[in-house]
Image (cartoon, grey):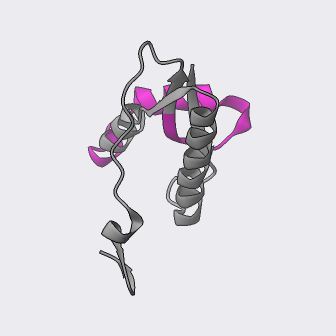
Amino acid sequence: MYALLAVRDLHDRRGQLLAGARWQRIHLQLTEMGLSAQPMNQLMEIVDRDRRLLRPSPTAELLQRWVGAAGGHATFAFRLGYAPRSVPHSPRRPLQAVVKAGGLR
């Protein structure tokens, strides 16, 4: 399955942060359910590149159709499903290895 997160304004910092927080919650919930998820933001990167180069973006039009009547603009994409095989978990460092008094290292 593929999914998109959309925001009203692509350039609103608060909306960007909320979309990122939403993705984190979704990813944790999916993991808890035994599902795998992977970010896939290539389409949004193409739209950004087209805008920077001041050229029309068929990809932006496609994303807009996918977001549809809900409105807003796609800001984050991911795929999810059951992994075909088991993989080891990412290594984790203890909290003390990344945090010191007064903030992050």
Q: Seen in the image, is 76 located left or right of residue 87?
A: right
Q: Residue at x 57, y 19 (%)?
A: 1
As rendered, which of 43 and 82 lies closer to the eye?
82
Q: Is residue 7 visible?
A: yes
Segment tinted magenta in the rendering = 50-77
Residue furthest to the left: 53
Q: Residue at x 62, y 35 (%)?
A: 32
Q: Is residue 56 visible?
A: no
Location of residue 64 (image quadrant): top right
Q: Give percent across and percent down for residue 29.
A: 64, 39
As rendered, which of 2 and 37 lies closer to the eye?
37
As rendered, which of 45 and 93 lies closer to the eye?
93
Image: 36 above or below 96:
above
Q: Give percent across and percent down for residue 82.
A: 53, 17
Q: Residue at x 56, y 45 (%)?
A: 23
Quarter of the image with the C terminus is: bottom left
Magenta stretch: includes residue 39: no
Magenta stretch: includes residue 61: yes
Q: How many marks?
A: 0
Location of residue 4 (image quadrant): top right
Image: 39 above or below 92:
above
Q: Give percent across and percent down for residue 86.
A: 42, 20
Location of residue 39 (image quadrant): top left
Q: Give percent across and percent down for residue 13.
A: 52, 64
Residue furthest to the right: 69
Residue furthest to the top: 84
Q: Seen in the image, is 20 located left or right of residue 91?
A: right
Residue furthest to the bottom: 102
Q: Residue at x 36, y 44 (%)?
A: 48
